[in-house]
Amino acid sequence: MHLVDLHCDTLYKAVTQNISLDDNAMEVKCDIPDNSKRLQCYAIWIPDDLSSDYAEKLFFTSSDMLEKECKRLDISLVKQNDKINDVFNDNQSSAIFTVENAKALNGKLENVSIFAKLGIKIMTLTWNASNQIGDGAGVDNTNGITDFGKIVVSEMEKNGIVVDISHASDRLFYDVAEIASKPFVATHSNLRSVADNKRNLTDEQFKIIVQTGGIVGINLHKDFLSDKPEDACKYDIIRHIDRFLSLGGENSICFGTDFDGCDLPKDIKGSETMDEICEMLLKHNYNEGIIRKIFYKNALNFFENFDNGRIM
């Protein structure tokens, strides 16, 4: 089965531990099974406790490493003017560079266009704390988006960078929904009605993303899959998918695994488990058309529409 994975932290792990993307310690495996294609979004995570200057430095260090690693591993890295669907169709293994936490901008609006030139296609506005954009999901009594954040969102849209509201506070989510002129996404977020965690989306928030033409990536972190994290398993994915589908999400749900950046359920070992998840869905009477949408077609359709400036 082909796969588009909207989020992993493998790049952060490689940079900070000085290891390769195909190191045995990685949950994302760079060897792709025959007759399969994978487009992997490699996020550089910016922890909240980093200084803004170091966050910016970490971004540029990661950009250099990802480019070198993709060349070494024969992974096609999406560039600024590439059509993502064309890259996916023409290569067995491809990659998109993304940012997790716009603190990486270091408060410099000009960095938005610089990031775009380096191939950034998606950027989360926050991690769990507050930054110069707004407030994350871990902040109580939030103020929502800042004036600078409003400008950043507009500049991201102008430069073809998708706004990602994973990790956003509820207030920041609704502020973005009000000002965004293009579809936005939650690359690695589940549903609060299935697992009551503030990092997950409410049903209403998911419906807003669907209505604006965005997509949501199913996160495999056990705390986001189940209210009983220690008992979480891959079957909890079905509970989220069923709920997503009941809310009209057939064309909007994808995977954003969070590999190499989360605590996985005991029966999910890494990207090699994705084939088992596909088989599980088939055994639970999901038709192949819907499975293909979830695994890769919804994401590719979103990127095609976003690249062409169409709002669904």
Image (tube, rainbow, N blue to C red):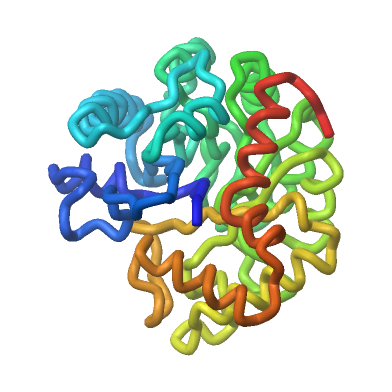
Relative vertical location of residue 229 with respect to residue 48 in this rendering, above or below: below
Residue 53 visible to an observer of this rendering: no
Residue 308 is left or right of residue 207, and the answer is left
In the image shown, does 56 or 297 lie closer to the viewer? 297
Relative vertical location of residue 198 with respect to residue 120 in this rendering, above or below: below
Q: What residue sits 38% from the left and 82% below the top?
A: 266
The location of residue 251, given as percent across then percent down, is: 76, 50
The location of residue 185, given as percent across then percent down, is: 66, 42
Residue 206 is left or right of residue 38, and the answer is right
The location of residue 198, given as percent across then percent down, is: 63, 65
Q: What residue sits 72% from the left and 45% below the top?
A: 173
Q: What residue sits 74% from the left and 20% below the top?
A: 309
Residue 151 is left or right of residue 48, and the answer is right
Relative vertical location of residue 245 with respect to residue 82 in this rendering, above or below: below
In the image shown, does 131 or 167 lie closer to the viewer? 167
Farthest residue, direction left: 18
Give the quarter of the figure containing the C terminus. top right
Q: What residue sits 45% from the left and 66% below the top?
A: 275
- Image quadrant assignment for residue 184: top right
Residue 39 visible to an observer of this rendering: yes
Farthest residue, direction front: 35
